[in-house]
Amino acid sequence: MNYAAVPQVDKEVFARPFDNWKWGWIDVPPIIEGAEAVYEFPLVDRDPLPRWTFERATLLGDAAHPMYPIGSNGSAQAILDARYLTDCLTSDANLLYALREYDAERLPRTAGIVLRNRMNGPEQVMQMAEDRAPNGFAHIDDVIPREQLEAVSLRYKRLAGFDRDSVAAVRPA
Ligand SMILES: Cc1cc2nc3c(=O)[nH]c(=O)nc-3n(C[C@H](O)[C@H](O)[C@H](O)COP(=O)(O)OP(=O)(O)OC[C@H]3O[C@@H](n4cnc5c(N)ncnc54)[C@H](O)[C@@H]3O)c2cc1C
């Protein structure tokens, strides 16, 4: 990691939001106070693009759909892009049609993930728990019923193509 490219920030930026993070087994404020330097890694994405394909050239992976690193999706979607692009190129004799087909299938799918990740993707359950039990809880089931947790998870899996039906529908390479 090239830390020269990462903005160093004043300790105060993080000290205040974490000033009550003391749980006996870990005491965060002195860790921040004792740090030699504090760096801020901002979440960065881009609005979905209107198209990826320009004649014989197309985009894939982060170049096509940089997204917040939520839901373990950045490289996973790059792999799904590569898989679909390979399918298109091997099954369509016309290169330009193959690239357009790839664009038409993968662009809207990944655009949905880019936008959902701005709403925290499946990790929105952490905010739900904080909103419902700001003073803590003994067991997650007391705060968010299991069906609700599973519904959030399944919605995101379907969007990303990781749900059981989508995976089962993929034919072996
Ligand atoms: C902190 C962090 C955590 C992440 N966690 C996850 C995770 O848990 N799960 C997940 O799926 N994804 C995760 N990601 C996202 C994932 O790393 C990226 O989505 C993925 O690496 C994108 O792959 P890519 O091949 O499209 O681009 P890259 O991995 O960026 O590859 C592009 C390559 O092209 C090279 N390059 C650039 N310009 C040129 C040039 N002119 N000539 C030759 N080469 C060039 C670059 O050096 C680079 O090696 C995370 C990302 C970050 C930053």
Image: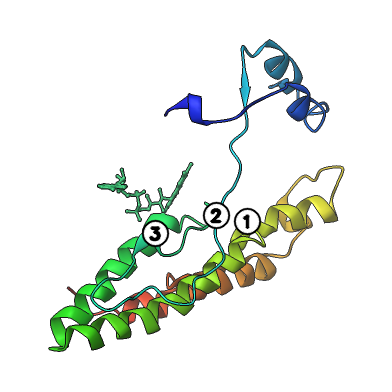
Label 2 crowd (10 A; few <14 / some 14-19 / many >=20): some
Badge 2 vs badge 1, beta-carbon distance below 8 Å: yes
Name the spot of residue 9 as percent of width and height, x first: 68, 25
Instruction: Give residue 90's quadrant in the image.
Output: bottom left
Separation (CA) of disc 1 from disc 3: 24 Å
- What residue type is disc 2 on? Ile
Residue ID for mark 2: 70
- What residue type is disc 3 on? Ala
Q: Secondary structure at mark 2?
A: loop
Instruction: Give residue 83's quadrant in the image.
Output: bottom left
Tell which of 101 and 168 is nearer to you.
101
Q: Secondary structure at mark 1?
A: helix
Viewer-nearest of discs 1 and 3: 3
Label 1 crowd (10 A; few <14 / some 14-19 / many >=20): some
> Which quadrant does the N terminus fall into?
top left
Residue shown at the point (45%, 59%) measured from the top left? 73
Residue 63's label in the rendered image is 3
Using the image, determine if residue 86 lies above or below residue 11.
below
Using the image, determine if residue 71 lies above or below residue 5.
below
In this view, the residue farthest toward the front is 55
Instruction: Give residue 127's quadrant in the image.
Output: bottom right
- 137 relative position to 70: left or right: right
Name the spot of residue 97 as percent of width and height, x first: 25, 88
- What residue type is disc 1 on? Glu
Residue shown at the point (69%, 22%) measured from the top left? 26
Q: How is the image coloured?
A: rainbow
Label 3 crowd (10 A; few <14 / some 14-19 / many >=20): few
Name the spot of residue 123 as percent of width and height, x first: 63, 56
